[in-house]
């Protein structure tokens, strides 16, 4: 998809719910959000439509309603957002990126740091493999 991916709070919450559930329709999502967010069914429907147009959700017509499911994984969307943010600050090759990342990891749990170390090891191994 061309252009920068921009997501509002409701769009992120909607994606989180759908990633968790696997699929949903507007009515079930409305029931989930109506009390905590005080939004209407039409707002939920509009949000789902926007996410579909952004190619983040698939939809299938079931009876008289659409059922939505993820078109991209949570990890893939997060990677796109981080990559775009870094590109905006031209930080991809700067030491500023490493400094920002170090600041974030300072408050990480030991489990998160272990997972991060594993990902770095896997990335290094992948770079060393002949193509």
Image: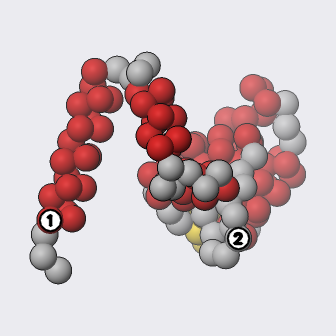
Which color scheme is applied? Answer: secondary structure
Q: In terms of depth relative to the viewer, which is nearer, 109 or 69?
A: 109
Numbered disc in front, either 2 or 1: 1
Which residue is tagged 2? Answer: 3
Q: Tell me if residue 121 comes above or below residue 67 in the rendering.
A: above
Pointer 2 local density, CA inside 10 Å: few below 14, some 14–19, many at least 20: few
Residue farthest bottom in this picture: 131
Looking at the image, residue 51 lies above or below residue 104:
below
* Residue 24 at x, y percent in the picture: 59, 53
User: Which element carries disc 2, helix, strand or loop?
Assistant: loop
Camera sees residue 42: yes
Q: Which residue is mark 1?
A: 128
The image's mark for residue 9 is: none
The quadrant the C terminus occupies is bottom left
Question: In this rendering, is residue 114 above or below 61?
Answer: above
Q: Residue at x 65, y 51 (%)?
A: 89
On the image, the x and y values in percent for residue 58 come to 59, 68
Q: Residue at x 13, y 69 (%)?
A: 129
Q: Is residue 77 visible?
A: no
> Splitting the image into 4 quarters, where does residue 55 fall?
bottom right
Q: How many marks?
A: 2
Q: Position of residue 29 (x, y in %)?
A: 68, 44
How far apart are the two marked residues, 2 and 1, measured between alpha carbons? Answer: 32 Å
Looking at the rendered structure, the secondary structure element under dot 1 is helix
């Amino acid at each position: 998809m061309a252009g920068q991916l921009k997501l509002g709070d409701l769009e992120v919450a909607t994606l989180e719910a759908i990633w968790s559930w696997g699929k949903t329709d507007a009515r079930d999502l409305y029931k989930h959000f109506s009390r905590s967010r005080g939004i209407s069914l039409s707002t939920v429907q509009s949000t789902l439509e926007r996410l579909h147009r952004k190619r983040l959700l698939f939809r299938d017509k079931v009876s008289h309603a659409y059922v939505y499911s993820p078109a991209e994984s949570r990890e893939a969307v997060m990677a796109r957002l981080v990559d775009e943010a870094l590109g905006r600050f031209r930080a991809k090759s700067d030491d500023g990126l490493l400094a920002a990342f170090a600041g974030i990891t300072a408050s990480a749990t030991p489990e998160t740091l272990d997972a991060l170390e594993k990902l770095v090891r896997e990335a290094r191994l992948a770079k060393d493999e002949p193509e």
